[in-house]
Image (tube, rainbow, N blue to C red):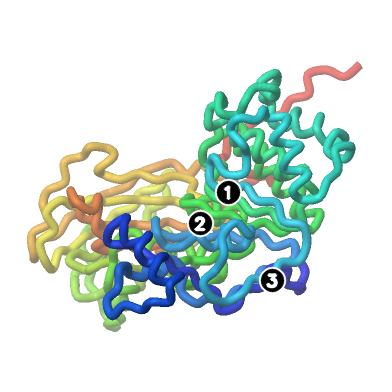
Amino acid sequence: MSSEPVIRIQNLSKSYRVYNRPIDRVLESIMHRSGIRESGTRFREIDALKPLDLEIYRGETVGIIGRNGSGKSTLLQIISGTLYPTSGNVEVKGRLSALLELGAGFNPNFSGRENAYLNGSIVGFSHSEMASKFDDILEFSGIGDFIDQPVKTYSSGMYVRLAFAVAIHLDPDILVVDEALSVGDIRFQNKCFRKLRELKEQGTTTLFVTHSSDLIVRHCDRAVLLEKGSMHSTGAPGDVVNEYLNLLFNNDEGQVEANLATTDEISHEENGLITDRLIDGCRLRPLYNPAEYRWGDQRGQIQDYVLLINGKVATSMCEAGDRIDLLLRIIFTQDVANPILGFTLKTSDGIVVYGANTRERKLDVPSGKAGSEILLRFSFTINLIGGDYFISLGLADDDEQKDNLAVDRRYDLIHLQVKAEQSDFGIAALNMKILIDDVH
């Protein structure tokens, strides 16, 4: 990755006029052309993007994430030149190839072949240059004889296959992708991301929008979080994804500051949990991660945990194949009508290995009454390749209107180190044996 910016965005904003009635748009245009000014207004201004500054560098893969209506697609359209900003400017260095929302960029009445040549001519390729690339485009897309059919007859998956194949074979210095890959099947998505890695090694800058936090963590060097048209934050993908999840689950309180109260002599119950419920026992545990990300309205709290490895209290790393028991205490300071209790295991770079919660398992969890508590246990076998993993725990309130409300989410709460005899790679430990049966 180079320190040279290939996209420089300065004081960029985009506003739209929303008219009260369709006729008001016509009247406004007539008045404007006539030079007549009215005291009232026939429209209101909607800010799709508020002034923002951003630099993206050569060879960088940047993911744009945010809730619906946050301005993600608007930003990519302005960068791609298909939309004009209201103010500010965008400087782009190099050939840009864009795969925007489904349906953009292709003439529906043209065949796939004709659209491929048309897109090539738009970015400056001659007919002979596109002819030399066409076989590769067709092979990558995998749509076969449909290439000579009008694209209006294509399924959404076929459309994306061809559009992506064309975009990556136009020798882009910058590739812009807006959610389109979410339409394709999983095998084609994997093929696309392998190609994106190849382009990155060649110095191509990639900018893409997605709602998938896993894709942001797995494929990006940096992430940008947009919220209500403003740049909320930018930085390491894992950190930005945590902030996005905070916004997504409707927490208005921000990150929670834990109770730091401690005592020199702490009493424990038979199960090992701390007796004093005013103490945040999680912070006193050997495998606690002080860099956890915590948020929620705190009507209930994940107050303490005990992690057992093969029946013994964990003090250090475990081994692949060990039995893990995680005992939790949840305390309620206010009523939580429909508690959801969840568990997620992630790699050190934020890729989800496994997740489960009581709602998806259809388990009957009693209502959390103020002053009450719930004890629960997660039990599993740690069939993982050696490495660093993080356990996240969550308490939410199942809400009919908002799906679920964050009560106490403790992301990356427990740092679990796994050691393994073999230096295999990946995530899952399959206990594979490699046997050479015969040699001739």
Q: Write down the residue under mark 3.
A: 91
Q: How dense is the environment of label 1, judged by Cα within 10 Å: few (below 14), some, or many (20 and up)?
A: many
- Mark 3 and mark 2 lie on one chain; the one further toward the N terminus is 2
Horizontal and vertical percent for residue 106? 62, 39
49 left or right of 169 in image: left
Horizontal and vertical percent for residue 289? 44, 68
Residue furthest front as drawn = 34
Which image quarter is the N terminus in? bottom right
User: In whole angstroms, how far apart are the C-alphas of marks 1 and 2?
Assistant: 8 Å
Element under disc 3: strand
Residue furthest right as drawn = 440
Q: Residue at x 34, y 57 (%)?
A: 393
One can see residue 208 in this view = yes
Out of 260 and 67, give the one closest to the viewer: 67
Out of 335 and 69, give the one closest to the viewer: 69
User: In whole angstroms, how far apart are the C-alphas of marks 3 and 2?
Assistant: 18 Å
Q: Write down the residue under mark 2.
A: 73
76 left or right of 249 in image: right
Q: Write down the residue under mark 1.
A: 100
Asked whether the residues under the numbered discs 1 and 2 touch, taking CB atoms below 8 Å apart as contact, a structural biologist would say yes
Residue type (three-letter) at the residue carrying disc 2: Ser
Residue type (three-letter) at the residue carrying disc 1: Leu
Out of 73 and 200, give the one closest to the viewer: 73
Residue type (three-letter) at the residue carrying disc 3: Glu
